Image (cartoon, rainbow, N blue to C red):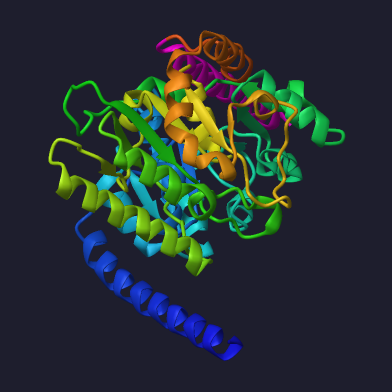
């Protein structure tokens, strides 16, 4: 078995190498047609060192960055040829390719950004963080109660833009000697101000169920994914009901490590295809698109794993069910919303339709939800989070000018 595993790993490595080489060639031709940025024209940079598989982390910032760019010049810095190709097609703000450290040095010399934003904890972030005379600011790619949200790596950044009171308390509990008042700024969830897009189903009486599971995780403590334990049953029950519609939006990394997890994922996709073929009016959806918004806003009930999707949905204050991890090794922090969540255990997945219908009508559950909305995000009225995001940027720019002026006098 180990020989077979090693062989598969070798094949994947070769495939990645060939794909990367092809992407570099394609990118070189594309970049030859892209005019360079004028020196000194980038005030705020977004640093993204990951490959295409993790582009969901930066995509969710597209709309907030586009709005911010109306006030301050913004650019995204990419280190991956595949990611850069996608950004050239998608990004609403200029993009810069910096594959090597020397390219980063050139970017810093030519642009001298005042703020650099980071959407994840990629180890290559430190290649950018070596440069001073700019604020390095962690903005993350979602709010959640996963252990990722309390990593000691927060201390590496000058500042962190966090969602609200729950995030502040979470960090206070986990990090030693971290000055929350000085180094964190609460902004809510500005992405929620930009949730948009037309739903791909007709207006009818079906209850729309969004099932948005995460991937299987790379260690036992992070085994939050439910596709193999809950997902097939959830999908089969919803697809079999003429009163319900399934929107299946899996994490893009689903099944990358566990063949059984991938098999369950593919079984759900096949079941959706079969259900739509059997009933043309069903309009069940397998959503693997890059944009996020209409799925969360359009669903009557959302079923999610422990992931940032909980909190994207929570910000809308609409019915929410959370899958309980099947593995007892999964690290579940129940000090916040998860201590009061509407849990669905794997053994109860067969009753999902009754749970969905109850979630729509349970006034007590909806009232509890509103409490957690305020706790995690503060004011969620339209535009409030965007205003806080912009105010945080202005605060950091003002601080940069103050510090820069003081150094000039020395």
- In this rendering, would 185 be left or right of 228? right
Q: Quadrant of the C terminus?
A: top right
Is residue 403 visible in the rendered structure shown here? yes
Expressed as whole percent of the image width and height from the top left, the position of residue 121 reads 61, 49
Which residue is the extreme one toward the right?
Answer: 177
Give the vertical position of 288 relative to 370 (above or below).
below
Which residue is the extreme one toward the left?
Answer: 280
**Residue 388 located within the stretch drawn in magenta:** yes
Give the vertical position of 198 relative to 175 (above or below).
above
Identify the residue shown where x is 51% and y is 23%.
314
- In this rendering, would 402 be left or right of 301? right
Give the vertical position of 368 relative to 213 (above or below).
above
Expressed as whole percent of the image width and height from the top left, the position of residue 123 reads 62, 57
Identify the residue shown where x is 71% and y is 40%.
332
Q: Kindly indicate the quadrant of the structure image that contains residue 290.
A: top left
Give the vertical position of 138 relative to 226 (above or below).
above
Q: Kindly indicate the quadrant of the structure image that contains residue 152.
A: top right
Expressed as whole percent of the image width and height from the top left, the position of residue 296 reads 38, 29
Please identify the dominant SS of the magenta region.
helix
Identify the residue shown where x is 38% and y is 45%.
235
Is residue 110 visible in the rendered structure shown here? no
Identify the residue shown where x is 67% and y is 38%.
149
Expressed as whole percent of the image width and height from the top left, the position of residue 294 reads 31, 29
- In this rendering, would 4 be left or right of 66? right
Q: Nearer the viewer, residue 380 or 278?
A: 278
Q: Which residues are magenta?
A: 382-410
Q: Quadrant of the N terminus?
A: bottom right
Q: Nearer the viewer, residue 281 or 39?
A: 281
């Amino acid at each position: 078995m180990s020989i077979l595993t090693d062989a598969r790993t070798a094949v994947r490595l070769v495939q990645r190498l060939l794909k990367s080489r092809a992407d570099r060639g394609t990118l070189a031709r594309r970049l030859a047609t892209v005019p360079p940025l004028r020196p000194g024209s980038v005030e705020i940079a977004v640093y993204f060192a990951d490959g295409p598989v993790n582009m969901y982390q930066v995509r969710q910032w597209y709309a907030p960055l586009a709005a911010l760019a109306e006030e301050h010049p913004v650019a995204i810095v990419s280190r991956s040829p595949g990611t850069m190709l996608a950004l050239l097609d998608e990004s609403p703000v200029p993009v810069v390719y910096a594959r090597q450290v020397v390219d980063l040095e050139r970017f810093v010399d030519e642009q001298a950004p005042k703020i650099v934003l980071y959407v994840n904890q990629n180890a290559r972030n430190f290649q950018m963080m070596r440069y001073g005379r700019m604020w390095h600011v962690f903005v993350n790619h979602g709010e959640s109660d996963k252990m990722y949200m309390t990593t000691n790596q927060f201390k590496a950044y000058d500042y962190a833009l966090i969602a609200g009171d729950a995030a502040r308390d979470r960090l206070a509990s986990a990090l030693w000697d971290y000055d929350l008042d000085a180094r964190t700024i609460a902004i809510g969830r500005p992405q929620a101000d930009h949730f948009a897009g037309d739903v791909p189903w007709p207006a009818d009486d079906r209850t729309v169920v969004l099932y948005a599971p995460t991937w299987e995780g790379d260690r036992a403590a992070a085994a939050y994914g439910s596709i193999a334990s809950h997902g097939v049953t959830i999908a089969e029950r919803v697809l079999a009901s003429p009163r319900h519609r399934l929107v299946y939006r899996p994490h893009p990394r689903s099944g990358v490590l566990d063949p059984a997890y991938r098999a369950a994922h593919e079984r759900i996709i096949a079941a959706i295809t079969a259900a739509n073929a059997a009933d043309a009016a069903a309009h069940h959806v397998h959503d693997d698109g890059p944009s996020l918004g209409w799925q969360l806003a359009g669903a009557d009930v959302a079923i999610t794993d422990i992931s940032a999707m909980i909190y994207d949905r929570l910000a809308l204050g609409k019915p929410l069910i959370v899958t309980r991890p099947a593995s007892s090794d999964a690290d579940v922090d129940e000090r916040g919303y998860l201590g009061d969540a509407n849990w669905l255990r794997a053994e109860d997945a067969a009753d999902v339709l009754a749970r969905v219908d109850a979630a729509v009508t349970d006034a007590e559950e909806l009232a509890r939800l509103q409490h957690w909305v305020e706790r995690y995000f503060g004011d969620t009225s339209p535009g409030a989070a965007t205003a806080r995001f912009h105010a945080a940027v202005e605060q950091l720019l003002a601080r940069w000018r103050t510090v820069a002026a003081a150094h000039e006098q020395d």
